[in-house]
Amino acid sequence: MPPLVEITGLTAAFDGVPALRSVDLSVGRGEAVALVGESGCGKSVTWLAALGLLPGKARVGGSVRLDGQEILGAPPATLDAVRGGRVAMIFQDPASSLNPVHRIGRQITEALALHRGTTGAAAREEARRLLDRVGMPDARRRLDAYPHELSGGQNQRVMIAMALAGAPELLVADEPTTALDVTIQAQILELLAEIRRDTGMALVLISHDLGVVAETCERVCVMYAGRIVEETAAADLFAAPAHPYAAGLLAALPPIDGARRPLAAIPGGVPEPWAMPPGCAYAPRCPRRVAACEEAVPRLSTVAPAHRAACIRPLPQGAARELMSA
């Protein structure tokens, strides 16, 4: 079956400085895919570029096909039907995404009118049903509340309700639990999983929290400096990462059991887009680098069945475990 979304060779540049460097990514129907990596790796920009949400000065190239139809550079009328309709996106700070001067009910009914053509009393009743669906307590009364009267977790539920107003085939969740405490975070993740089970909706989770990814997603794409450097099933990534960067991210996680040990930090930082090193962008931070790493950008190649990594010296399983436990 062809993928629901297929991104090929996606690039984005601001004032001539590349932010995305040929991203290839696909999402199947009903699939849960994670994009992980440090801040500044290009996770959010990938989907903002794919959905035509970057500012006008951005130069975007490549191909983004939704159900076989090219949407990159599509006319505004086409994108208006896609965004919020077939593909919805929620962000990590819901308070900044909601209009502070309009009541919650008005904002949800506006989405219903735009994507379903539902207005009046029917739209208000459907808005109440959506708030009930996302677990909002006393949903009917909350329709008349303003965003500042709700907690962070409640505002995130409102954002999810607005996303569901268009009955999307794909939900892109950009750090949806970052500002929430662990109890509310667990509730939001369970809500997203329940919605997927009930509707068959696909999910893209943008996160730096590997624990959240392990619980939520079936496949993981690790991003670094505007490129995907590793792609595999979530279980395989946690058991045997092939790229040294992915292994470094996992090594930085505190162990749940066993002897206590210092956390292993990756030295340095993600290079700035205007100061990219030659060859592999991770080479200056990589403990396995050799001279050949600086000669060419490594391609995303198969290192095991359904497992790809952009590294000329991918880690064998034993080496990955040693690095993660060092």
Image (tube, helix red, strand yellow):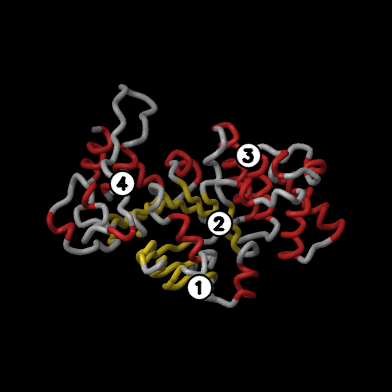
The C terminus lies in quadrant:
top left
Using residue 257 as the reference point, say whether residue 58 is left or right of it: right
Q: Is residue 4 visible?
A: no
Q: How many marks?
A: 4
Q: CA distance from mark 1 to mark 2?
A: 20 Å
Using residue 101 as the reference point, say whether residue 31 is left or right of it: left
Q: Amino acid at mark 1?
A: Leu
Residue bearing mark 3: 152
At mark 3, the secondary structure is helix
Return the x and y of residue 277 as percentages of the image width and height: 23, 58
Q: CA distance from mark 3 to mark 2?
A: 24 Å
Residue at the spot 52% in from the left edge and 75% down from the top edge: 73
Q: CA distance from mark 2 to mark 4?
A: 32 Å
Residue bearing mark 2: 202
Q: Amino acid at mark 2?
A: Ala
Q: Are marks 1 and 4 in contact (CB under 8 Å)?
A: no
At mark 1, the secondary structure is loop
Nearer mark to the viewer, of 2 and 4: 4
Residue at the spot 44% in from the left edge and 52% down from the top edge: 35
Using residue 17 as the reference point, say whether residue 108 is left or right of it: right
Residue at the spot 33% in from the left edge and 36% down from the top edge: 252
Q: Residue furthest front?
A: 15
Q: Along the line of sight, which residue is nearer the eye, 262 or 239? A: 262
Q: Amino acid at mark 3?
A: Gly
Residue bearing mark 4: 269
Residue bearing mark 1: 72
Q: Residue furthest top?
A: 259
Q: Are marks 1 and 2 in contact (CB under 8 Å)?
A: no
Q: Along the line of sight, which residue is nearer the eye, 32 or 142? A: 142
Quick check: 304 above or below 254? below
Q: Earlier in the sequence, mark 1 or mark 2?
A: 1
